[in-house]
Image (cartoon, grey):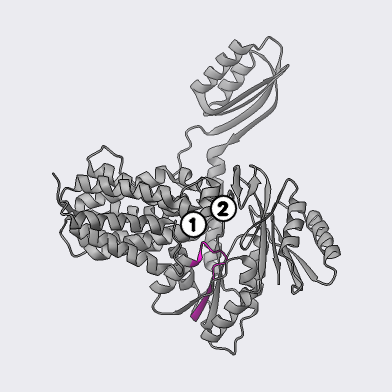
């Protein structure tokens, strides 16, 4: 019977929980109610916990205090999206309760669960039941119950707590009708359960890979080219064989087998009297000599991938050096602005309105709390306004606000890009930060926003049947239109948004929409609403074909 846990065991449990969540992240992403093409709950929770896991894995001498600091600090800074922020707050409360302990018993663990839930609920402005919070609360209640019953065996304790957590998770669709209609449980709650199940496996002594690899990271969440990348085969070789002999299935298989012996990334496509070939190899001549057995060659192309990689690295390094040389510290100012945005056009709009620093991100990649902190540091101002421009980024901004002590940080809870644009337009330099905050909050509520994207899976939402590949017009409170034509979906979305009080319609078209198509949509909307001012601007945003606001 095991009745205590020390810091080393807890560290292993945390790493195992992180790894288990990472392995299930795509499955958790698929539990999202809205079938939109974004990196959502599973990705956000994984990036959050992995930020802390890297710190824990790097520890040499593990004691409870240093472990708790690593888990709390790492998850707070790495928190992304609402689910990631809530997970980080659960860790924050949990570690705060146990950091002074050397060994944990079940009563201490129950106290820590209570503190975790209390901290997470306080971090959310309007806690909603049927979410990760509900699952965490159910786990905490069960932990308290077992502790008060005198349970002293951690094996029994964890088994009962996890069973209870699964039961609460299964009930989440009864608490949130939108989950029930979509036929899924809460994705954040499922993520939390995968952390606990991974931790339990480590506690039970299961052989696990606890190594944590550090992915290259930039502010936009994308990886840069790596100088130490290993290119096993250096030449990308392509050609077409003009056949002069029979090239049957057996011949094709023999040819592929030979190519596999000298390279990789092999593609062989036979079509009547020609064969298209692609292979990465260190000796293109061998591939060419073998191919000549079957016919003459044309369209030959050989690229030195190692040289191309080195040139790319050189150009990136040169560009970074030029940028660093040209950048001078920004002059100090009283007020600065940070906005989250994706799309060259939208970035330029914000910069033109006076935004000092752009954080690349949005629905497809939620920036972390650390991204927010880094941006705040770059803005040389006493007061910094943050425009998250996405409801799933507001909590990360709020968390950064709490962590900054040397500047006044004001988070304006903008949920869409048009709300962010309206907020900064209504900033008045002569007013105080508090007055501006209140004024901006009032103004953003006057803005209606619709966004057109596509469905990544079949589902039913709000009694609307959606098929994979359908275009969807999504408004502030739900889906407004569905169809197979992007312009038609956008137009019907606008019709659902409009009322008699609205006077201005702004259309921001994305990177996959031509200016001509956007102009045609603008003209169609103008004919339907001749009394409204219609503005058309290039947004350049990915994933979302149109972002349209009405105010």
Q: Return the x and y of residue 517 as percentages of the image width and height.
A: 80, 54
In the image, residue 293 above or below residue 408: above
Q: Report the residue at 37% width, 60% height from top.
A: 88
Q: Residue furthest front?
A: 174
Residue 62 visible, this orientation:
no
Which residue carries the number 1 mark? 218
Quadrant of the snapshot with the N terminus: top left
Q: Secondary structure at mark 2?
A: helix
Q: Return the x and y of residue 381 as percentages of the image width and height.
A: 50, 80
Which residue carries the number 2 mark? 315
**Dot 2, how many residues are within 10 Å of its Cα: few (below 14), some (14-19), or many (20+)?**
few
In the image, residue 417 above or below residue 1: below
In the image, residue 539 above or below residue 543: below
Quadrant of the snapshot with the C terminus: bottom right
Horizontal arrangement in the rendering, residue 1 relative to residue 380 (left or right) = left
Q: What is the CA distance from the residue labelled 2 to the residue labelled 1? A: 17 Å
**Dot 1, how many residues are within 10 Å of its Cα: few (below 14), some (14-19), or many (20+)?**
few
Task: Residue 384: say if magenta.
Answer: yes
Q: Return the x and y of residue 532 as percentages of the image width and height.
A: 80, 71
| Residue 240 circle label | none
Horizontal arrangement in the rendering, residue 392 relative to residue 17 (left or right) = right
374 or 415: which is nearer to us?
415
Q: Which quarter of the picture shows residue 75?
A: bottom left
Q: Secondary structure at mark 1?
A: loop
Where are the magenta residues, as a range? 382-394
**Which is more foreground, mark 2 or mark 1?**
1
């Amino acid at each position: 019977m095991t009745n205590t846990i020390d810091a080393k065991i807890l560290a292993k449990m945390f790493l195992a929980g992180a790894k288990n969540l990472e392995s299930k992240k795509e499955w958790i992403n698929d539990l999202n109610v809205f079938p939109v093409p974004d990196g959502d709950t599973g990705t956000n929770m994984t990036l959050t916990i992995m930020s802390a896991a890297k710190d824990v894995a790097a520890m040499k001498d593990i004691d409870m205090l240093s472990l708790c600091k690593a888990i709390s600090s790492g998850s707070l800074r790495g928190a992304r999206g609402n689910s990631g922020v809530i997970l980080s707050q659960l860790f924050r409360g949990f570690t705060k309760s146990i950091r002074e302990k050397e060994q944990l018993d079940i009563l201490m663990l129950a106290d820590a669960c209570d503190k975790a839930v209390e901290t997470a609920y306080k971090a959310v402005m309007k806690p909603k039941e049927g979410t990760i919070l509900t699952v965490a609360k159910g786990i905490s209640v069960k932990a308290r119950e077992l502790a008060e019953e005198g349970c002293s065996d951690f094996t029994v304790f964890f088994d009962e707590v996890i069973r209870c957590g699964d039961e609460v998770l299964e009930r989440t669709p009864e608490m949130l009708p939108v989950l029930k209609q979509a036929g899924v449980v809460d994705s954040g709650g499922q993520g939390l359960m995968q952390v606990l199940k991974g931790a339990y496996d480590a506690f039970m002594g299961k052989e696990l890979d606890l190594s944590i690899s550090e992915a290259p990271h930039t502010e936009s969440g994308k990886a840069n080219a790596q100088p130490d990348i290993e290119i096993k085969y250096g030449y990308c070789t392509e050609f077409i064989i003009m056949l002069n002999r029979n090239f049957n299935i057996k011949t094709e298989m023999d040819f592929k087998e030979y190519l596999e012996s000298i390279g990789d990334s092999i593609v062989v496509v036979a079509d009547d009297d020609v064969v298209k070939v692609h292979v990465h190899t260190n000796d293109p001549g061998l591939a060419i000599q073998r191919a000549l057995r079957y016919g003459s060659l044309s369209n030959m192309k050989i690229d030195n991938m190692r040289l191309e990689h080195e040139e790319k690295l050189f150009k990136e390094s040169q560009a970074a050096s030029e940028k660093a040389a040209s950048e001078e510290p920004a002059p100090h100012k009283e007020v600065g602005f940070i906005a989250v945005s994706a799309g060259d056009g939208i970035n330029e709009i914000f910069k033109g309105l006076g935004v000092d620093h752009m954080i690349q991100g949005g629905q497809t990649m939620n920036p972390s709390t650390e991204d927010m902190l880094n941006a705040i540091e770059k803005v040389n101002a006493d007061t910094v306004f943050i425009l998250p421009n996405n409801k799933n980024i507001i909590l990360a901004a709020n968390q950064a606000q709490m962590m900054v002590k040397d500047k006044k940080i004001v988070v304006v809870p903008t949920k869409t890009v048009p709300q962010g644009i309206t907020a900064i337009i209504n900033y008045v330099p002569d007013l105080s930060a508090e007055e501006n905050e209140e004024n901006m909050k009032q103004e953003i509520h006057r803005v209606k926003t619709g966004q057109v994207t596509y469905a990544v899976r079949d589902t039913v939402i709000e009694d609307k049947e959606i098929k994979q590949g359908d275009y969807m017009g999504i408004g502030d409170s739900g889906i407004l239109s569905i169809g197979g034509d992007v312009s038609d979906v956008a137009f019907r979305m606008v019709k659902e948004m409009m009322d008699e009080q609205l006077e201005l319609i702004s259309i921001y078209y994305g990177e996959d929409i031509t200016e001509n198509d956007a102009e045609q949509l603008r003209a169609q909307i103008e004919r339907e609403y001749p009394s409204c001012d219609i503005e058309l601007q290039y947004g350049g945003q990915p994933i979302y074909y149109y972002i349209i606001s009405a105010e």
